[in-house]
Amino acid sequence: MTADREPLVLGSRTDAGPDRFEFHTADGVAAADAFCPGELLALEHLWGRDLGRLRTVGARYGVVGVVLADRATSVRMTTASARAAALCERNAAENGADAAVELATGLASIDGSADERADTAVFVPRAYAPIEVGIRRIRSALDSLVSGGALYLAAKPETGLGRYEDALAGAATTVETVAERDGWSLLRAEESPAADGGRPNPPFDRIDATVDGTDLELVTAPGLFAAGALDGGTRLLAETAIVEDGDAVLDLCCGYGPLAACAGRAADCSVWATDDDALATAAAERTLAANGVDGRVVTGDCTAGVAHESFDTILCNPPTHAGSGVLADLLRGAAAVLAPGGRCWVVHHRALDLDGYFAPFDRVETVATGAEHVVRLASD
């Protein structure tokens, strides 16, 4: 990750436990600039309670799990983001919290059963997260509980409170509002073993796309970028980039893997794909399999998961919304794993000026311009 920003500091007004917690954050992780009010509401309500085995779902950088570690018999923090998982591990270690961190999609139908069921689960959905994703994580969180266990969910109307209440009402034994503040509500739902017939169905959808005359079957999921159809930028990059037989190819920020699938179908090459999001890589594995492409898929922060490899061709449609720190890490990492004489193809919106992020490369040129996107070719 890029250089640290100042850590966020959380003080405690109780005699038990530390009087101060510090949390390191980074671009690309939700609530990086200020604590999430929903997490703070959950902390205040749960502080004096017997939590037993605690599981946090969709942990950002570990606030709930770290602060409540001394109040629980065990803590497991789960997140789909490799970057968030690394921050959770760091913050647990630096605050002296005994907590395990699990990189997972948060969906029981993919991740399987937890090694240990929880007595208490806490989930604070991200703002702007697709409601369907949040609902599936609710059902998986309930599925991870012991009989009679409780899920605490914090939300406000703008983040889907009403829809989450409805989902809990259909999947839990009881649902009640136990705390409110500044528009946020904290709901408590008890696990119902018989609700909804068990685990949710796998969340994958399938879409068809034709790129340069090649028919592809793409496996997607709600919450992933361009889940409903192949986006114009990815299509422009796939139609522009040159992949040759014998190349080692990396689809960086692969999403559900369309560029990796295109490369594997276009040439006799070795294919790698990596993404920060565990749900994205789960979909990418299925996309490669559906298209008969033998490739390796890795969940990792930027190029961390492939740092010891070397690639002749890198294909990247970066998450430009994730912040300057993520973009800097991505392109610095891409330059580090690019083989001598290799080529890094990057697509981005025409309105964005990303020239400064290409500094690790010796040469950069614009090689294609579409209605909304440009493709840049970077090399040593």
Image (spheres, rainbow, N blue to C red):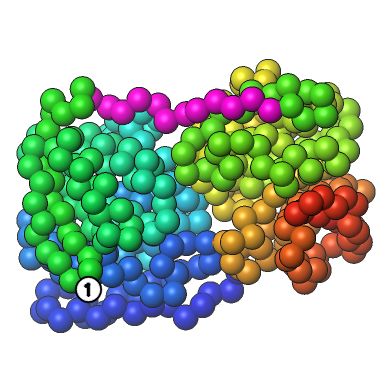
Q: Is residue 225 visible?
A: yes
| Structural crowding at the residue carrying mark 1, measured as other residues with C-alpha within 10 Å and reported as few (<14), some (14–19) or many (≥20) | few
- Residue nearest the viewer, comparing 210 with 13: 210
Residue 320 on the magenta span:
no
Residue at 47% across, 50% down: 81
Q: Can you give x and y, in whole percent of width and height, for residue 202 in the image?
A: 40, 26
Q: Quadrant of the N terminus?
A: bottom right
Residue at 47% across, 62% down: 29
Query: Disc 1 residue type?
Result: Asp
Question: SS of the residue at dot 1?
Answer: loop
Q: Is residue 95 above or below residue 267?
A: below
Q: Left or right of 137: which side holds 265? A: right
Residue at 55% across, 49% down: 276
Q: Left or right of 337: which side holds 150? A: left
Residue at 64% across, 31% down: 296
Q: Quadrant of the C terminus?
A: bottom right
Disc 1 target residue: 182
Q: Is residue 298 visible?
A: no
Numbered range of the magenta stretch = 198-209
Q: Is residue 270 above or below residue 132?
A: above
Q: Left or right of 361: which side holds 194? A: left
Q: Left or right of 146: which side holds 297? A: right
Report how many numbered discs are placed on residues in the image. 1
Q: Quadrant of residue 207?
A: top right
Q: Quadrant of residue 192?
A: top left
Q: Quadrant of residue 266?
A: top right
Residue 201 on the magenta span:
yes
Q: Can you give x and y, in whole percent of width and height, for residue 146 in the image?
A: 13, 36
